[in-house]
Amino acid sequence: MAAHHIDPADALASLRTAHRARAAARPRPLPGWYPATAAGLFALGFFLLGLSALLPERLWLPAAGLQLAAAAVLTGHVVVGHRVEHRPGIVAALPRPAAWFPAAAAHLLALAVSGALGLAFGPGGFLLILGPACGLAHLLQLRRKRARAGAE
């Protein structure tokens, strides 16, 4: 049986690398400003789309301005979410159904309420309610996620 001699400096470097890998894999808590910002941008973007849908066709220029503003706000929502939640080098595993079901149920409830009001008030009403309703569901989900990450 051959004995392997490992240089102490190499062993220490390996231990440091393993420690950094473990630290990178640990979930980071979400910043305190993130849930309100992400939910607010989501709600505002769809609210602006709803306002643009309610304008008469002859007011196409203000409607186009509202749509451009909505696109910018929703792009901001995606960029903020990516910057806060994206972690390079880590492949996210698919969550168990029990983990994503409450979030999906909250958003489906908001979507159902928006759909019912959309039937009564048209697409503009649907989008006007969809933004704040799904924004609230998103806010509650992100606060729960932040609290869970801080407890671990």
Image (cartoon, rainbow, N blue to C red):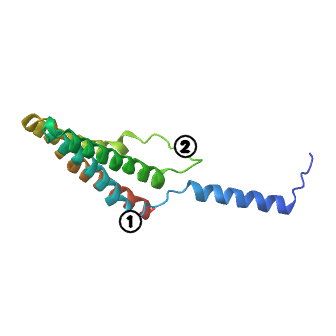
Within the image, what quadrant is residue 64 found in?
top left
- The amino acid type, in three-letter code, at marker 2 is Val
State the CA–CA distance, disc 2 to disc 1.
24 Å
Q: Are marks 2 and 1 in contact (CB under 8 Å)?
A: no
Residue 85 on image: x %, y %: 46, 52
State the residue position of label 2.
91
For the N terminus, which image quadrant? top right
Q: Earlier in the sequence, mark 2 or mark 1?
A: 1
Residue 46 in which image quadrant: top left
Q: Is residue 115 above or below residue 143?
A: above
At label 1, which amino acid type do we have? Gly
| Residue 83 image position (x, y, % from top left) | 48, 53
Residue bearing the label numbered 1: 32
Residue at the spot x=37%, y=64% of the render?
33
Q: Nearer the viewer, residue 50 or 55?
A: 55
Work out whether residue 90 or residue 70 is closer to the camera in this orientation and state it: 70
Residue 42 is tagged as none
Q: Helix or strand or loop: what does disc 2 sit on?
A: loop
Q: Residue at x 26, y 51 (%)?
A: 43
Q: Is residue 90 left or right of residue 6?
A: left
Would you say 28 lies left or right of 47 here? right
Residue depicted at 35% across the width and 43% down the height:
100
Q: Position of residue 111 (x, y in %)?
A: 21, 40
132 on left or right of 79 = left
How many C-alpha atoms fall within 10 Å of the one at disc 2: few (<14), some, or many (≥20)? few
